[in-house]
Amino acid sequence: MRDLVAETQLDVRQLVAPLFVREGIDEPQPILSLPGVVQHTRASLVQEVRELAALGVRAVILFGVPAQKDEVGSGAFDPRGIVQLALRDLSAEVGDRMVLMADLCVDEYTSHGHCGVLDGPAGDPHTSVDNDATLEIYARIAVAQADAGAHVVAPSGMMDGQVGVIRAALDGAGHRNTAILAYSAKYASGLYGPFRDAVDCAIVGGGDRKAYQQDWRNAREAMVEVRADIAEGADMVMVKPALSYLDIISAVKTAVDVPVAAYHVSGEYSMIKAAAANGWIDHDAVATEQLTAIRRAGADVILTYLTRWFAEHAAGGAR
Ligand code: PBG
């Protein structure tokens, strides 16, 4: 009877698995702060995505770890960059049954670790990210990713105007059917720590992203960002992280008519794993509770490192 009247369903078809692919390695590398998640080789990535497809997972989002970084993050738009190579592999192997998403940003690819190009020396307190110069780079990345087979590009850098520029670049290159999942309300969260280990990213000079990501004290500016992204052509909007921002997810769901995604980020995942490893919480119960809460708040889609676990152990299941 509880199932009969349950208001919220959690289904593997609504989950997206974030996956890391690293250039220049022969074996998958574990990520210490993200237990159970690895940096894939091109071959192990294809294998993983095949297995996810067999488990009923319908979507993945790729992050690249390049062998070389530079000032502008050129590995992100190089046709032979690691994510473009991985997308070509995947679109040939599983492109008919898996939605292929690509994170669109440069922080994994820049020597200074910021999400955009800088207007001065890295580490100097007067240096900023140059918003408009970064947009030109994002346009090139979008086209490179779509050329390589991405069905969805997901700009995560929080530059103003990024969605509009990317839409125009995609259309101009003939990629009218490539969708945009906008990381619209992305907070300058402390919960991205394990992710930065996963992509070997450190901000030069110990800086932060507070100049372009959102202030966790603010809710209303999330609505400004979401509405701007939709006006610029976003097909789906995202709130990130998820659990500390359930109020934002709920407000966005009420205010807009496009699908709403939420990113259950690396720190959220690792907190569950660490507490469960200590025997302090029940992993499966807490994981299910958290994902269900994100859906209850209004997320249509959840990006989560728990996707494979859910598909293997909980689909159809734990309540
Ligand atoms: C930026 C990006 C980040 C995450 C996804 N895309 C890191 C950041 O903004 O510092 C974090 C995801 C996570 O923590 O799981 N390319």
Image (cartoon, rainbow, N blue to C red):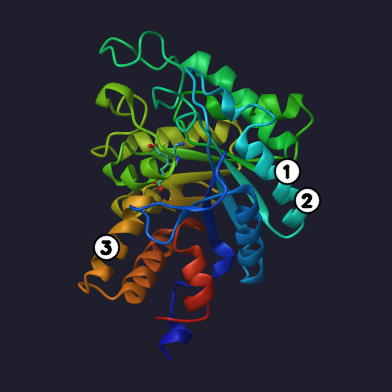
Q: Amino acid at mark 1?
A: Arg
- The reply, left or right, for residue 258 in relation to residue 215 is right
Q: Amino acid at mark 3?
A: Ala
Q: Residues within 10 Å of mark 1 (few under 14, many from 20)?
A: some
Task: State the CA–CA distance, disc 2 to disc 1.
Answer: 6 Å
For disc 2, the marked residue is 92
Quadrant placement of the C terminus: bottom left
Q: Amino acid at mark 2?
A: Ala
- The reply, left or right, for residue 239 in relation to residue 214 is right
> At 62% from the left edge and 24% from the top edge, which residue is drawn?
139
Q: Are marks 2 and 1 in contact (CB under 8 Å)?
A: yes
For disc 1, the marked residue is 88
Q: Residues within 10 Å of mark 3 (few under 14, many from 20)?
A: some
On the question of residue 220 being in view, the answer is: yes
For disc 3, the marked residue is 274
| Residue 166 point in image, percent of width and height | 62, 28
Residue lying furthest front in this view?
26
* In the image, residue 290 above or below residue 90: below
Q: Which one is in front, 248 or 276? A: 276
Q: Are marks 2 and 3 in contact (CB under 8 Å)?
A: no
Q: In the picture, residue 169 is in which quadrant?
A: top right
On the question of residue 258 being in view, the answer is: no
| Residue 86 point in image, percent of width and height | 66, 44
| Residue 205 point in image, percent of width and height | 27, 22
Q: Which one is in front, 279 or 236? A: 279
